[in-house]
Amino acid sequence: MAVNDSIFLHAHEAPGQQSLQRCDACGLELAERDASPECPQCGGLLAIIHRAPVDVMGAPLAANVIQHAFMQHCCAMPMGHPSGVWRFQSLVMPTAGEAITSHPEGNTPLLTRTRVSAWAGCEGLLLKHEGYNPTGSFKDRGMTVGTTQAVRTGATAVACASTGNTSAALASYAAQAGIPGLVFVPAGKVALGKMAQTLAYGATTLLVRGDFDDCLRLVQDASRELGIYLLNSINPWRVEGQKTIVFEILQQLGWQAPDFIVLPAGNLGNTAAFGKALREAHALGLIDRLPRLVSVQAAGAAPFARAFREGFTARHRVQAETIATAIRIGDPASWDRAVRAIRETDGIVLSVTDEEIIDAKVQIDAAGVGCEPASAASVAGVKQLVQNGIITAADRVVAVLTGHVLKDPGMLVELHQRADFAQANRPLEIDATVQAVADVLKTRSGASR
Amino acid sequence: MAVNDSIFLHAHEAPGQQSLQRCDACGLELAERDASPECPQCGGLLAIIHRAPVDVMGAPLAANVIQHAFMQHCCAMPMGHPSGVWRFQSLVMPTAGEAITSHPEGNTPLLTRTRVSAWAGCEGLLLKHEGYNPTGSFKDRGMTVGTTQAVRTGATAVACASTGNTSAALASYAAQAGIPGLVFVPAGKVALGKMAQTLAYGATTLLVRGDFDDCLRLVQDASRELGIYLLNSINPWRVEGQKTIVFEILQQLGWQAPDFIVLPAGNLGNTAAFGKALREAHALGLIDRLPRLVSVQAAGAAPFARAFREGFTARHRVQAETIATAIRIGDPASWDRAVRAIRETDGIVLSVTDEEIIDAKVQIDAAGVGCEPASAASVAGVKQLVQNGIITAADRVVAVLTGHVLKDPGMLVELHQRADFAQANRPLEIDATVQAVADVLKTRSGASR
């Protein structure tokens, strides 16, 4: 029997429940407050299925009514919810109530920068900068929802195995919820500089005597045996939060879908979440057509791009290596969901080299925006699609930047002092004279910007 | 003759002009597009004076009409302006038009965190987190307006002498405007790690052979002789942008003024800007009473706090020394304006020790929020005022956090590994067993949070 893959709960399903969790693989259904990290029957990924919004008489809400409700929430007003995630609560976690643990987060801008557009060859390029979330990455959107679920389920602690943006976000939200946060990393293999936010926000960093696989196994065992709520990348509530990147883009565009949404792709969690968001928005009539999703992998960590070229006939694993650490993943967890997202949106998967990523990052930085290295993969991907003729002059394209430039300042200082880096912006030593300044200005004004 | 200190232009003044610049000291008036960094007659500080908003018949707008106009702008909507600065354009730079250079910025949240409130002893404490601006500090609010003025005046370049948040913001906005950005710092005295954002955003860092005074003199000479627009701390348009921190707080509170607004104070630019914003908001009827402004200095850089205790009978200078580098200023530039702001709002100036600043920072960090060291001075100040009985249980207090925790990650890692720091959050090494995790959890749950 085919697994139920309905987008929303049907009227006759799950009476009295607003949302439930359903296994992608075997279709097993769990109550929405069940804290299982994966399907207890088959180990498959869990997804959240909501009841579509209805009016007091039980009739489905018209799209414009739903859109109007979203408009009642703004970060600068005293009414409504100031979060760019919880504004969309009816499609994220309708029954959260008092459990909501929000920084607030979201409300990230859509930027236009002529320098970046010109470099990519795409005049209609908009940058959705998720690095402007409170802890500096898109992870906050999923963590606010995941942590709210931890509060609802009475978790003894929340945990993940991560050295990067995930642990920073987990630490911040755990602190706010007043729940101990645990971050598992292999002992002796992590530079503490990467953990600055995690330490500051007060999560406990556990240096596990073993390798990364031992960490993963331990965090899962501990979650089962100790009532610790697992906030790893496949957590279904984190997916619900990440959906709001798409909802917010659509709202900012007046619910006119762009032609392409382009994003960096490693573990494929965002590709999966974006696909789910678009599916739901389209089913509710919030948009009348689907944008094409474009997932961009780093060439050294591109099993999904290879599978796309082969028509998704096989799942691949690779030994990942790229400068873009946030997408350095060889065996992506959300594979099947991402395949569905790409198929349903007539999507595209491609890969870009580390050189292309650095080139794109230098352009984004020098436009006064800046981003984490992995973020730049999306803009590098746009450039490639323009060169291939797939993105054309009239297209409206949204590229997602996932992290803030301040997430990796050491890399910047090193890069801009390297003698062999043509685009290095080296400091200039001058005498304290106006003539010396005039000379610099002459060079600068003449340089191509 | 007394200098004209009217809050808005009177009907008969400056016909045909929406705004002008007026010298605080001698009253000289300049056109709004004049690029002078200070009064060309007496060297005094320039201030921007606007015409109060009027309707098409020339009658003053009612407060609720002005408030309604501000509401038409939201970061998540396609209509209006997405910036938390330009939302208030009629009180910032009404005639900016096409010159506006906006990231966008602002739209920063008002946070409540029980842990911080409990530590400070102030239940009604709200944190206005300006570190959530695009480059990580409140400086973006002034830079968007200052850079817009540079565009309007046809500047050949923009410049400042700064090693910190100012240079990062200048570099970002100069890049966006397509104007060369110049940052003057003394050669051999600045760690390049501090300049990571400036380098990335493509401003030219000039290492001047000389000390900081030589830098200041050079940047002023160069601005006069080379058509470079000076974006230093006394730039009157930067003040206009910084006013919007207050406007946004008031809007977020439904135009009900809080009892206190507390902010870190070094160069006194924000104290001056906050005073101007409150004066204007009160004159327009946007609020019906003034909150008390509280400026908090670091004990090692507290000339203004000393002068306050002496009834502002004298101006002081000190050799500044504090861990809070962003407010390490011995001779504040906006002194007289800050005195006016404190007097008009029945304000308070106090100082807190570096130990109090670190204590406050550790609490803000461990609440999952985080901030730059200088930011924590405001919360340390709140605690002191609660202990002195000046802030009482019923009071609503807004404390401003000026910078993001990611602005100084090195300090965090060092702090949390220090053997002599009682609140250090040290990583724990454990065996890869569930029992080891359970043991950690037992300790964590018992620890006071």
Image (tube, coloured by chain):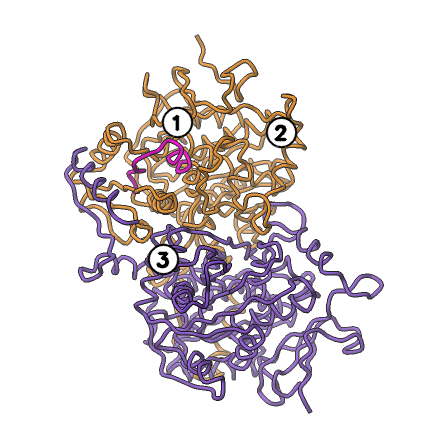
Chain colours: A orange, B purple
Give the CA separation, mark 2 to mark 3: 52 Å
* In this view, A131 is above or below B312: above
Classify residue A339 by image quadrant: top left
Q: Nearer the viewer, residue A131 or B404?
A: B404
**Badge 2: residue crowd in 10 Å (few <14, some 14–19, many ≥20):** some
**Badge 3: residue crowd in 10 Å (few <14, some 14–19, many ≥20):** some
The residue that mark 2 highlights is A289
Give how far across and how far down residue A40 sits, in percent: 32, 20
Left or right of residue B335, residue B281 in this image? right
Give how far across and how far down residue B219 sits, in percent: 49, 80
Q: Check if residue A159 falls in the magenta segment.
A: yes
**Badge 1: residue crowd in 10 Å (few <14, some 14–19, many ≥20):** some
Give the CA separation, mark 2 to mark 1: 24 Å
Residue at horizontal 26%, vertical 27%? Answer: A224
Amino acid carrying label 1: it is Trp
Amino acid carrying label 3: it is Trp
Q: Nearer the viewer, residue A78 or A25?
A: A78
Range of magenta residues: A146-162
Q: Is residue B361 visible?
A: yes
The residue that mark 1 highlights is A335
Left or right of residue A156, residue B332 in this image? right
* In this view, A288 is above or below A406: above
Give how far across and how far down residue B44 sits, in percent: 58, 85
Q: Chain of mark 3?
A: B
Q: Which mark is residue B119?
A: 3
Quarter occupied by the N terminus of chain A = top left
